[in-house]
Amino acid sequence: MDSVPRLGGQIGPERVAPKAKAGDVPSPLNKTYVVGFSATKAGYRGAVLVLALSTATFTSSRAAFAQPGGAPVQRDVSDRGAATAADPGRTNRPTITMPVVTKDAGAAYPQQAIADKIKEQVTIDLILELDATGAVTRVTVDKPVGHGFEEAATEAAKALQYEPAKRNGQAIAAKIRHTYVFNPPASRVRGRVATERGGAGRESPVQGATLTLTSLGVVPAPPDSRSSSSLSPLNAGSSGSVSTFSATAQSDGTFRLDDVPAGSYRIVVAAAGFVPQSYEETLEAGQEATIDVRLAREVVAPLPSAKGEEVDEVEIRGKRPPREVTKRTLEQRELSRIPGTNGDALRAIQNLPGVARPPAIAGLLIVRGAAPNETNIYVDGTLVPLVYHFGGLSSVIPTEMLEKIDFYPGNFSTTYGRVTGAIVDVGVRDPKVRKDRGIHGLAQADLIDARVLAEGPIFNTGWTFAVAGRRSYVDLWLKPVLEKAGAGVTTAPVYYDYQAIVQRDFDKKNSLRFFFFGSDDRLSLLTRTVNGSNPGIGGNITLGTAFYRLQARYVGKFSEDTELRLTAAVGKDAIDFSIGDNFFVLSSSPVNPRAELSHRLAPGARNNFGLDILYAPYTVNLRLPPPPRPGSPPAGPFGSQPPLVVSDSDAIYRPGMYDELELTPFAGTRIVPGVRLDYAKDIRSWDVQPRVTVRQDVRREFPRTTLKGGVGRFAQPPQPQETNRVFGSPGLVSNVAHHYGGGFEQEITRQLEIGVDAFFRQYDRRVVQRLGNVGEGRAFGLETLLRYKPDDRFFGFLAYTLSRSVRKDSPDEPERLFNFDQTHILTAVGSYRLGNGWEIGARFRYISGSLNTPQQYGFYDATVGSYIPLAEFPPFGRRNPAFHQLDVRVDKTWQLHGGLKLSAYLDILNAYNQANVEGVSYNYNQTLSTNAAGIPFLPSLGLRGEL
Amino acid sequence: MKAALSTRSGAAARGVSSSSVAGVAGVARVALFAVVAVACGAAGFDPASKVDSVRLFVVKADKPFAKPGETVTLEGLTTDARKEKTRAAKLYWIPILCLNPPDDLYYLCFAPPGSASADAQAARLIPISSSSPGGAMASSAGVSGANLFASLPTGVDLAPFLPQGPTFAFTMPEDSVQERKGIPPYGLAIVFNIACAGRVEFAARDASGGAQQVPVLCSDESGKRLPPSDYVIGIARVYAWADRVNTNPVVESLTAGGNDVDLTAGITLDRCTSAKESECAENKIGLRVSEASWEPNPSEVTRDGELREQIWVDYYADLGTFDDEARLLFDTRQGRVSESDVKYRAPKDAADGTLWAVVHDNRGGAAWVSAPLHIR
């Protein structure tokens, strides 16, 4: 074996030969040369040319490297017995001089390979035939690989110029092997690191923040290692097969990384005093990725200047982009400032596309033409029975406790199940810790309720806490009203809710949290008057609905690839309702453990496996009139039939499991196939639910364009009352709905974006109470959201939904409109900061009228003494006039000494006092009717203090 | 003021155990809303207590809970308060007993077989012979109601063939009591009647009109349907229990201004001389029902002890107006309700009329008193 020099330089993270030194002379024979070059094609560095020389009779497989400019280098040279001029033992043989390259323009990396997203290093071996002048007369590809590499190599080889091979000094033709090694052109990463937006919508650059890219596998070597940030130093290095790149943000928060090999990376953005962010990204060859990051402070910063206010961000997300079809984000400023909601985040959901307007007194979530009972509400993964006090006055968890709200209007992940409609998952935030490690407090009061919150560290234990509570004082003004109306009021309507959190992050990889929360609504009154239409609705009326949950959550990162999330909740639901001699008393103690193991299988492939178990022993005692048949008039006035009675103790057991893959085969492509398996003990039935969603970025850079779609099967077990031996039907199976969705997202400006979603939902074997799985239905529509993301002054959005939802209650019944069908739903929201702490906002809604069933003169129940209307068939055949309403909100904030912040708001519902029709009011025998108006002009004043 | 608001109960249900929570909350909202609506009045319509048309106030069964085989006598309370009485109003009884319609749905008594709303287990329709003693039925076998109604001709004045008058009797079939889910066995017999100031005809059925259709109509001599002011189609329910009893409430006295009213002499009041009705004098009218009327209401499942009946009173008058004309007398748990008097305002013109007070319990029992009204 010849002893040859090793020459070269550092080439990115890959092991390379040292640079050639001046004066080094390569052995002319049986050497393999590598020639590096910079391609002239824009956007990437060129391939590395490996030139192997041999004679027509002798070949070499040696490999060598050279730096751009052609200085030959060599590595791993081996001799397969070729005679050389340096071989003194073979003097009788002719002296042969190898061809020497004199002109080499290099090979361009093929565009087709870029388009095909080739990330691996590709080697093309060529056989070159040279004539006696050194010109290349024939090029043969040894092993074609496609993607344009052969063409690129052949074209480059034809332009090579050689000093011809010689035998005893005489130029001769030669046949040599020539190799091109193509490395994918490097990517570029640029972006900016800033703080989260404050209450004034302002953000600050985070100077010194580090951005670290760690390869999630072997990445090919870039052509050279001169990646740099124009604004900060850059380090690149490797450890084994894992490569890392880093950059530091400059004073304006910007950073830049050049020459990053294509591949999948874990990106970590960290800065002192901020919560680091980490996520995975796939960089495509020759492309530029933009990463804008906002970091949350680890501690509460002192309140900003008088012009601004510090408000944490809370997100409402349409769906998580990795696992769902669409994503919509509303920040907390939007949630807390949408007029007409009193700053209630959960009520803000009702403004999103696809969500219908509920009746005036009903706090229902009607999503994409689904019934309210098709939407499940979770708090950090734990199912809760109620989301609103008294059906809509306010939500059971105050906005101040929320971190985010994930809202999935359809095609949701296999993480969730047991419903055919939509999912709302409320994320509760971690307790804050002030810089001075003091207690952060908040108090707020309006005309409906008052709330307090305190949070901070628990001494120096490493634990943090947050406690909050709220009580309504509706009773203070409603009690006199009811008493004046002739009712005897024992307990005027009142509600409470409470929350307590203790949490500890043991390290950056393990977190443990206990969360106790609950809600309690009560009323008790005696009505001395009798409802003429339903004399049975009267007398003693009591209502108590309460629930609480104790939730424990553990999140552990076993490695960079594996994360375990455990959530377990125990609690109690209690209902005590009575009206006259009818009552419903339920006590249930649900246990709801969940677990999800998330593991990265390979770059661009992650698997999520989860268990989701619901066990709920219950006791129920009830005495109620038989429920009416769906779509059919009742048997008479309420209470005119002998009531049914049930006294049962049993348990609901519904285990579920799911497995879901998150695939990123190419940058900008996200495919999430999954399957969920649910079992319902009460119907002894399994439900297999395959689902898949796909997202494809047509353009990843600004302005981003994304196409998306999904299809899936969703099963919902019958409600307990539907399987009950008295109220329900035997032999039921789950309701089934198939969701089909598709759409696109388009950035228009940095602040303005639009999203369009089309959906179709097919209902099969829908349970119709007392009749069985005989129902059908479908819902379809188009949702559009044009959104101006919050900036220093303004935020707003325009949401429009066009939809239709129909049902059949049995195969023989005609198709009818779904009770809550609303054809047009238009919502426009905007809020503007005027300065000096003033902010004014407005919400305008134009929505198709809700449906009603016309009534006319019919029968008289001479036993009860009440007229029975003739209800038009099919039901819900008439639409009320369109609803339109303007709500206005004005906020004023004062920054006081000692960090105290005071704010006041005036939220005016129905500013121009539109008499929107909520129903039709009939006289006692239905011969006369008039429209019943909804909520009139209604101002609400609130005050808030925060320290 | 009686009024009905078409609302949706929003019987929302979420999750598993949550479904009932939301559903009950929905009922509670409707109940609360109904209370407020009643309290606040509704839409400015004339109240049910203002009588100015053909009215059927109540049908009382002498045995609200009959035993199989017992004869039940129904008695209807009617009036005709129309200003112009072109034809006399009479109370006609449809001599067909509808026994145990599916789910107690009265309108399935006449749903034709094969219709979407008809059940495999249809109601039994039993013709009642008016010649039988006490109006007892000729046979307990019965026939399909749908066939029976379908065989009746339309456009024919049935009034001459129908039993007339305030009372009607039938015998509860021996096999009327049947097993039910969630409740001890009972039977339900439904009798239809019509207070009509004209001809009574069977109405042609609309094939696409749904299950709830009116089987009879009241027309003039040319067959034209008369307006609602000229007729009332009544439904009377009588339950059959093997072991439960119910008696009608007993009215002890009618009071005006706290004093017992002589039901023959009636109530004499001054007419209202104020321009505004709201400024007219308020006269308290009350009704006293015996404590014994508040009967136990047996239930296999109880809450907070024994349940008893709920009893209320509806007031009517063909002169003057009432505030909150329907008042609770006994609550199912709290017993006798205080402040159950209503306020009556006399009309502006002197006249003579009638005041009716009809008492109901929530198990089908009823009673009434009436007294002349003299407005000076």
Image (spheres, coloured by chain):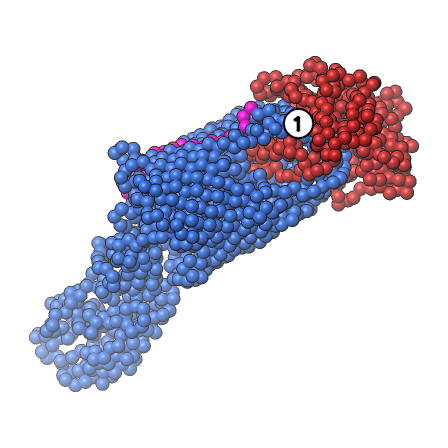
Chain colours: A blue, B red
Q: Nearer the viewer, residue A417 or A198?
A: A198
Answer with the quarter of the image where residue B174 lies: top right
Q: Position of residue B81 (x, y in %)?
A: 83, 31
Residue furthest left as drawn: A88
Say which residue appears at 73% left-offset and 22% top-offset.
Answer: B285
Q: Nearer the viewer, residue A771 or B206?
A: B206
Residue bearing the label numbered 1 = A529
Q: Is residue B217 above or below residue A536?
A: below
Say which residue appears at 26% left-offset and 79% top-offset.
Answer: A160
Q: Position of residue A415 (x, y in %)?
A: 44, 43
Q: Position of residue A527 (x, y in %)?
A: 63, 26
A79 displayed left or right of A889: left
Q: Nearer the viewer, residue A428 or A815?
A: A428
Q: Is residue A269 above or below residue A161?
A: above
Q: Nearer the viewer, residue A81 or A622?
A: A622
Image mark count: 1
Say which residue appears at 90% left-offset and 35% top-offset.
Answer: B87
Residue furthest top as drawn: B292
The three-letter amino acid code for the residue at tag 1 is Thr
Is residue A505 one of those drawn in magenta? yes
Q: Is residue A33 above or below residue B15?
A: below
Answer with the quarter of the image where residue A538 lies: top right
Q: Which residues are magenta?
A: A490-517
Label 1 marks a residue whose chain is A
Q: Is residue B111 visible?
A: no
